[in-house]
Amino acid sequence: LACAAAAPAVAQDSLPPASGDSLAPPVAEPAPAPAPAYPFEVGERFAYKVKLGIFTVGRAGMEVLARDTVRGREVFVLRFTLNGRALFFTLDDTLTSWTGTRDFRSYRFLQDNNEDGRERTKDYRIFPDSGYYRVNQRDTTFQTIADPLDDTAFFYWVRTLPLEVGRTYTWERYFRPDRNPVRIKVLKRQNCELPGNDKRKCLLIQPSIKATGMLAESSDARILITDDADRIPVEVRSNFSFGTLVLKLQRVTTGGTAAGAP
Protein backbone atom coordinates (compact mmCIF):
# COMPACT_ATOMS: atom_id res chain seq x y z
CA LEU A 1 0.00 0.00 0.00
CA ALA A 2 2.83 2.38 0.80
CA CYS A 3 4.39 1.77 -2.60
CA ALA A 4 1.08 2.38 -4.33
CA ALA A 5 0.55 5.62 -2.46
CA ALA A 6 3.98 6.88 -3.40
CA ALA A 7 3.64 6.07 -7.11
CA PRO A 8 2.85 8.96 -9.51
CA ALA A 9 -0.63 9.13 -11.02
CA VAL A 10 -0.97 7.58 -14.49
CA ALA A 11 -3.26 9.07 -17.13
CA GLN A 12 -6.21 6.83 -17.98
CA ASP A 13 -5.46 6.82 -21.73
CA SER A 14 -1.94 5.55 -21.12
CA LEU A 15 -3.23 2.33 -19.55
CA PRO A 16 -3.36 -0.86 -21.66
CA PRO A 17 -6.79 -1.86 -22.95
CA ALA A 18 -8.92 -3.98 -20.65
CA SER A 19 -9.23 -6.70 -23.29
CA GLY A 20 -6.67 -8.36 -25.49
CA ASP A 21 -3.12 -9.51 -24.79
CA SER A 22 -1.22 -7.94 -21.90
CA LEU A 23 1.96 -6.07 -22.72
CA ALA A 24 3.85 -8.36 -20.33
CA PRO A 25 3.14 -11.86 -19.08
CA PRO A 26 1.81 -12.06 -15.51
CA VAL A 27 4.46 -12.58 -12.88
CA ALA A 28 3.77 -15.39 -10.44
CA GLU A 29 4.22 -14.57 -6.77
CA PRO A 30 7.16 -16.45 -5.26
CA ALA A 31 6.25 -19.36 -3.06
CA PRO A 32 7.06 -18.89 0.63
CA ALA A 33 10.33 -20.42 1.72
CA PRO A 34 9.90 -23.81 3.40
CA ALA A 35 10.16 -23.89 7.18
CA PRO A 36 13.52 -25.09 8.52
CA ALA A 37 13.86 -28.71 9.57
CA TYR A 38 13.92 -29.18 13.35
CA PRO A 39 14.77 -32.21 15.52
CA PHE A 40 11.29 -31.92 17.08
CA GLU A 41 7.67 -31.71 15.95
CA VAL A 42 4.19 -31.49 17.38
CA GLY A 43 3.48 -34.47 19.63
CA GLU A 44 7.00 -34.85 21.00
CA ARG A 45 7.02 -35.09 24.78
CA PHE A 46 9.72 -35.80 27.34
CA ALA A 47 8.67 -36.89 30.83
CA TYR A 48 11.12 -36.59 33.73
CA LYS A 49 11.23 -37.62 37.35
CA VAL A 50 12.50 -34.90 39.67
CA LYS A 51 15.00 -35.88 42.35
CA LEU A 52 16.32 -33.99 45.36
CA GLY A 53 19.28 -35.97 46.58
CA ILE A 54 18.18 -39.60 46.80
CA PHE A 55 14.48 -38.71 46.96
CA THR A 56 12.04 -38.49 44.07
CA VAL A 57 10.03 -35.35 44.80
CA GLY A 58 8.04 -34.68 41.63
CA ARG A 59 7.84 -34.72 37.88
CA ALA A 60 8.60 -32.47 34.94
CA GLY A 61 7.82 -32.39 31.25
CA MET A 62 8.80 -30.74 27.97
CA GLU A 63 6.31 -30.85 25.13
CA VAL A 64 5.67 -29.48 21.64
CA LEU A 65 1.95 -28.94 22.10
CA ALA A 66 0.82 -27.59 18.73
CA ARG A 67 1.32 -25.26 15.82
CA ASP A 68 -0.62 -22.05 16.21
CA THR A 69 -0.73 -18.52 14.80
CA VAL A 70 0.30 -15.32 16.58
CA ARG A 71 -0.32 -12.05 14.76
CA GLY A 72 -0.34 -13.85 11.42
CA ARG A 73 2.85 -15.87 12.04
CA GLU A 74 2.94 -19.63 12.44
CA VAL A 75 4.42 -20.65 15.77
CA PHE A 76 5.25 -23.71 17.81
CA VAL A 77 3.55 -23.86 21.21
CA LEU A 78 6.25 -25.16 23.55
CA ARG A 79 5.67 -26.01 27.20
CA PHE A 80 7.86 -26.81 30.19
CA THR A 81 6.31 -27.98 33.48
CA LEU A 82 7.88 -28.65 36.86
CA ASN A 83 5.94 -30.01 39.85
CA GLY A 84 7.64 -30.89 43.11
CA ARG A 85 6.70 -31.54 46.73
CA ALA A 86 9.10 -31.96 49.62
CA LEU A 87 9.30 -31.10 53.30
CA PHE A 88 10.62 -27.58 52.80
CA PHE A 89 9.20 -26.48 49.46
CA THR A 90 6.54 -26.83 46.81
CA LEU A 91 6.88 -26.04 43.10
CA ASP A 92 4.17 -25.90 40.48
CA ASP A 93 5.57 -24.04 37.47
CA THR A 94 4.35 -23.94 33.87
CA LEU A 95 6.24 -22.00 31.20
CA THR A 96 4.66 -21.74 27.74
CA SER A 97 6.31 -20.23 24.67
CA TRP A 98 4.87 -19.26 21.28
CA THR A 99 7.94 -19.40 19.01
CA GLY A 100 8.06 -18.82 15.23
CA THR A 101 8.42 -21.93 13.08
CA ARG A 102 10.37 -20.04 10.40
CA ASP A 103 12.39 -17.41 12.29
CA PHE A 104 12.52 -19.07 15.75
CA ARG A 105 11.67 -15.85 17.55
CA SER A 106 9.56 -15.67 20.70
CA TYR A 107 6.24 -13.88 20.19
CA ARG A 108 4.63 -14.70 23.54
CA PHE A 109 5.90 -16.16 26.81
CA LEU A 110 3.59 -17.14 29.68
CA GLN A 111 4.97 -17.84 33.17
CA ASP A 112 2.49 -19.42 35.57
CA ASN A 113 4.34 -20.13 38.80
CA ASN A 114 3.28 -21.27 42.25
CA GLU A 115 6.26 -21.63 44.57
CA ASP A 116 5.67 -22.25 48.28
CA GLY A 117 2.14 -20.89 47.92
CA ARG A 118 3.22 -17.68 46.20
CA GLU A 119 1.37 -17.49 42.89
CA ARG A 120 2.75 -15.34 40.09
CA THR A 121 1.62 -15.04 36.49
CA LYS A 122 3.46 -13.03 33.84
CA ASP A 123 2.21 -12.90 30.27
CA TYR A 124 4.82 -11.38 27.95
CA ARG A 125 3.63 -10.25 24.51
CA ILE A 126 6.75 -9.77 22.39
CA PHE A 127 6.89 -7.65 19.21
CA PRO A 128 10.34 -8.22 17.64
CA ASP A 129 9.67 -6.14 14.51
CA SER A 130 8.65 -3.15 16.63
CA GLY A 131 11.41 -3.68 19.21
CA TYR A 132 9.31 -3.92 22.38
CA TYR A 133 7.36 -6.24 24.68
CA ARG A 134 4.47 -5.82 27.12
CA VAL A 135 3.74 -7.62 30.38
CA ASN A 136 0.22 -8.75 31.35
CA GLN A 137 -1.22 -6.66 28.48
CA ARG A 138 -0.40 -3.35 30.17
CA ASP A 139 0.18 -0.27 28.03
CA THR A 140 3.77 0.19 29.24
CA THR A 141 6.32 -1.11 26.73
CA PHE A 142 9.84 -2.38 27.30
CA GLN A 143 12.68 -2.70 24.81
CA THR A 144 13.41 -6.07 23.27
CA ILE A 145 15.90 -7.29 20.67
CA ALA A 146 15.56 -8.25 17.00
CA ASP A 147 15.67 -12.04 17.53
CA PRO A 148 14.27 -12.67 21.01
CA LEU A 149 14.07 -16.00 22.81
CA ASP A 150 12.49 -16.84 26.16
CA ASP A 151 13.45 -19.47 28.73
CA THR A 152 11.41 -22.33 27.23
CA ALA A 153 12.36 -21.49 23.64
CA PHE A 154 16.04 -21.73 24.62
CA PHE A 155 15.66 -25.40 25.56
CA TYR A 156 14.50 -26.10 22.01
CA TRP A 157 16.79 -23.66 20.22
CA VAL A 158 19.87 -25.32 21.78
CA ARG A 159 18.76 -28.56 20.14
CA THR A 160 19.18 -26.97 16.69
CA LEU A 161 22.80 -25.89 17.22
CA PRO A 162 26.05 -27.58 16.22
CA LEU A 163 27.98 -27.92 19.49
CA GLU A 164 31.68 -28.70 19.89
CA VAL A 165 33.40 -29.89 23.05
CA GLY A 166 35.57 -27.22 24.65
CA ARG A 167 33.82 -24.27 23.07
CA THR A 168 31.87 -21.47 24.76
CA TYR A 169 29.03 -19.89 22.76
CA THR A 170 27.67 -16.44 23.50
CA TRP A 171 24.51 -14.82 22.13
CA GLU A 172 22.50 -11.64 22.65
CA ARG A 173 19.16 -13.38 22.21
CA TYR A 174 17.30 -13.26 25.52
CA PHE A 175 14.16 -11.16 25.02
CA ARG A 176 15.01 -8.90 27.98
CA PRO A 177 18.17 -7.07 26.84
CA ASP A 178 19.49 -6.44 30.37
CA ARG A 179 19.65 -10.22 30.91
CA ASN A 180 22.07 -10.81 28.04
CA PRO A 181 24.41 -12.32 27.10
CA VAL A 182 23.39 -15.96 27.15
CA ARG A 183 26.29 -18.40 27.35
CA ILE A 184 26.63 -22.12 26.76
CA LYS A 185 29.82 -23.99 27.60
CA VAL A 186 30.23 -27.45 26.09
CA LEU A 187 32.10 -29.23 28.88
CA LYS A 188 32.61 -32.79 27.64
CA ARG A 189 31.28 -35.81 25.77
CA GLN A 190 30.21 -38.88 27.75
CA ASN A 191 28.11 -42.03 27.58
CA CYS A 192 24.47 -41.83 28.60
CA GLU A 193 21.40 -44.02 28.61
CA LEU A 194 17.88 -43.11 27.52
CA PRO A 195 14.68 -44.96 28.46
CA GLY A 196 14.36 -48.36 26.84
CA ASN A 197 18.06 -49.20 27.33
CA ASP A 198 18.94 -46.79 24.51
CA LYS A 199 22.65 -46.07 24.91
CA ARG A 200 24.11 -43.01 23.19
CA LYS A 201 26.86 -40.44 23.31
CA CYS A 202 25.89 -37.22 25.05
CA LEU A 203 27.24 -33.70 25.52
CA LEU A 204 27.36 -32.07 28.94
CA ILE A 205 26.63 -28.37 28.55
CA GLN A 206 26.48 -25.48 31.01
CA PRO A 207 23.87 -22.82 30.09
CA SER A 208 23.75 -19.44 31.78
CA ILE A 209 21.18 -16.61 31.63
CA LYS A 210 21.10 -13.49 33.81
CA ALA A 211 17.62 -14.37 35.00
CA THR A 212 15.85 -16.40 37.66
CA GLY A 213 14.88 -20.03 37.21
CA MET A 214 16.62 -23.25 36.25
CA LEU A 215 19.06 -21.65 33.79
CA ALA A 216 20.03 -18.68 35.97
CA GLU A 217 23.71 -17.89 36.43
CA SER A 218 23.37 -18.61 40.15
CA SER A 219 21.88 -22.06 39.51
CA ASP A 220 25.08 -23.48 37.95
CA ALA A 221 22.87 -25.53 35.63
CA ARG A 222 23.99 -28.56 33.63
CA ILE A 223 22.16 -30.22 30.75
CA LEU A 224 23.06 -33.63 29.34
CA ILE A 225 21.95 -33.71 25.70
CA THR A 226 22.39 -36.45 23.10
CA ASP A 227 25.21 -35.81 20.65
CA ASP A 228 23.21 -36.70 17.55
CA ALA A 229 20.51 -35.30 15.29
CA ASP A 230 17.82 -35.77 17.98
CA ARG A 231 19.50 -33.56 20.61
CA ILE A 232 17.35 -35.05 23.40
CA PRO A 233 17.77 -33.51 26.88
CA VAL A 234 18.47 -36.59 28.98
CA GLU A 235 19.15 -34.85 32.29
CA VAL A 236 18.83 -31.31 33.67
CA ARG A 237 20.53 -30.33 36.92
CA SER A 238 20.01 -27.00 38.69
CA ASN A 239 20.83 -25.57 42.12
CA PHE A 240 18.16 -23.91 44.26
CA SER A 241 18.31 -22.44 47.76
CA PHE A 242 16.86 -25.69 49.18
CA GLY A 243 19.17 -28.05 47.25
CA THR A 244 19.96 -29.42 43.80
CA LEU A 245 17.09 -30.57 41.61
CA VAL A 246 17.85 -33.22 39.00
CA LEU A 247 15.43 -33.99 36.17
CA LYS A 248 16.01 -37.50 34.82
CA LEU A 249 14.38 -38.56 31.56
CA GLN A 250 11.81 -41.32 32.11
CA ARG A 251 9.73 -41.41 28.95
CA VAL A 252 10.00 -40.20 25.35
CA THR A 253 6.97 -39.75 23.10
CA THR A 254 7.49 -38.89 19.43
CA GLY A 255 5.13 -39.30 16.48
CA GLY A 256 2.62 -41.28 18.51
CA THR A 257 5.15 -43.78 19.89
CA ALA A 258 6.55 -43.89 23.41
CA ALA A 259 9.56 -45.44 25.10
CA GLY A 260 10.40 -45.69 28.78
CA ALA A 261 8.61 -46.06 32.07
CA PRO A 262 4.81 -45.54 32.04
Image (tube, rainbow, N blue to C red):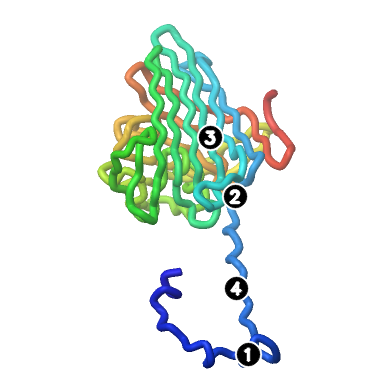
The amino acid on which the numbered mark 2 sits, given as a three-letter code, is Pro
Foreground mark, 3 or 4?
4
Write down the residue under mark 1: 17
Write down the residue under mark 2: 39
Where is residue 117 shown, x and y percent of the image?
40, 12
Residue 109 falls left or right of residue 65: left
Which comes before the other along the chain, label 3 or label 4? 4
Dot 4: element = loop
- The residue positioned 40% from the left and 45% from the top of the image is 126
Dot 1: element = loop
Which comes before the other along the chain, label 2 or label 1? 1
Write down the residue under mark 3: 79
Residue lying furthest top: 87
Q: Residues within 10 Å of mark 4 (few under 14, many from 20)?
A: few
The amino acid on which the numbered mark 1 sits, given as a three-letter code, is Pro
Work out whether residue 44 or residue 132 is closer to the camera in this orientation and state it: 132
The amino acid on which the numbered mark 3 sits, given as a three-letter code, is Arg
Residue 66 falls left or right of residue 95: right
Residue 173 falls left or right of residue 259: left
Dot 2: element = loop
